[in-house]
Image: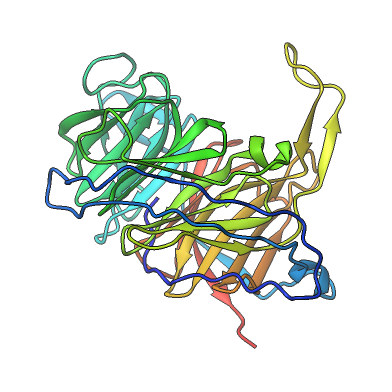
Amino acid sequence: MASHGYACWHASPPGYLALASALVFCSALLGGCDRIRGGLPATVTEGTSHVYRDKVREQRIGPRHDLTLRELLVVSAGTDSVGDWALGKPRAVAEANDGSIYVLDSDWKHVFLFDSTGALRRRIGGGYGAGADQMLLPVDMAAYDGHLHVLDYELNRVIVFDGNGPFDRVIQLGDQGRNVAATASGLWIRLMHPRQGRMVDLYDWGGEQPVARVGVHETDSAYHEAGVGGNIGTLRDGGIAYVHGSGAFLQFVRTHAEPRVVPVGPPSDWKYEEDPPPGLEPMYLPREVTYGVIEWGSDRVMVLSREINSPEARTTLTLIDNGGAVVAEGIFAGLGEVLSLDAGADPSTVFLTFLNPPKVVKYQVDIRWP
């Protein structure tokens, strides 16, 4: 999920707030890695951060409505040589500078290329299967350096395609991943099953084994098991940003620098699910699920969250500055079941993907500044 820009992030919790938890950020310093195609060596330094419960949200008087969306384009169906079709489950979007739109569909096992008007141009990939250019369960996609990087959960690999469509190569991974970010530092993989606080692995362009492992260690099992919420946001200098599954803080990781933690609110409200889906035990689930984070300008990020089991299906986009303060926010009821947030080529636009009905919508983001 490409985004643009990076700032050095610092948490500045008020002194009067009670300590909610001490989070010890431990990442393995496994040495530099040479990128095969001209990148930078990547290391992630060790660091210790103490995160205090932040009450930015509680200090506000009522919800904010200074961030609004204007619909620019809807992509939901198209026609190719096979005939009519509709999107199945769009999972990730990337937009090229010429307005071309790439959509990863995990049901069709393809990347679809649309032009700037939403017309289908071609399908990328070999469809369902385990062949070099095929996919079993594609779950995320990142665009970088003129290439598309498709993460396949079942095959434990990233399939690389040229932006024009041809298959390039396969990068094998050591663990199953849920999200991918591609930067000058290499491939960042959010793990499907976090272990002992390890949440994101960094691979060089050769793959096989991670060269660095990052995450947050915490004695509270709710923090420990929550993992990463939503996608990994890429940063201009090769670093990443992601929201911890608790919803309480953002984690910023950049190469050759100490990782930063920015509190963005109290932990998510957790509910006990007494009637889970068949085959699952009763469990605790967050009432709000974070679906993505993108870099917004040089000193802000935008975070997408959505209420689950809510009749209004309320979706929130929150713009947060480098100190963790809420700069602007939009609360939208009835948008639908949002799956992901992706940045557009124009820094004032975003893409949201939806499940029911399956579609991709490009929005202009308008912010009413004070």
Residue 152's image quarter?
top left
Q: How many marks?
A: 0
Camera-side residue: 81 or 45?
45
Residue 228's image quarter?
top right
From the image, which quarter does the C terminus lie in?
bottom right
Q: Is residue 74 above or below residue 206?
A: below
Camera-side residue: 295 or 208?
208
Kindly give the residue lying farthest to the top in the view shown.
279
Q: Residue at x 73, y 54 (%)?
A: 21
Q: Residue at x 72, y 63 (%)?
A: 52
Q: Is residue 194 above or below residue 117?
A: above
Q: Residue at x 75, y 76 (%)?
A: 15
- Residue 362 visible in the displayed image: no
Q: How has the structure been colored for display? A: rainbow
Q: Position of residue 272 (x, y in %)?
A: 85, 32
Q: Is residue 111 above or below residue 295?
A: above
Q: Position of residue 318 (x, y in %)?
A: 63, 64
Q: Position of residue 307 (x, y in %)?
A: 74, 47
- Residue 201 visible in the displayed image: yes
Kindly give the residue lying farthest to the bottom in the view shown.
370
Side of 370 relative to 43 (left or right): right
Q: Residue at x 52, y 45 (%)?
A: 215
Camera-side residue: 107 or 250?
250
Side of 281 relative to 156 (left or right): right
Q: Position of residue 260 (x, y in %)?
A: 51, 62
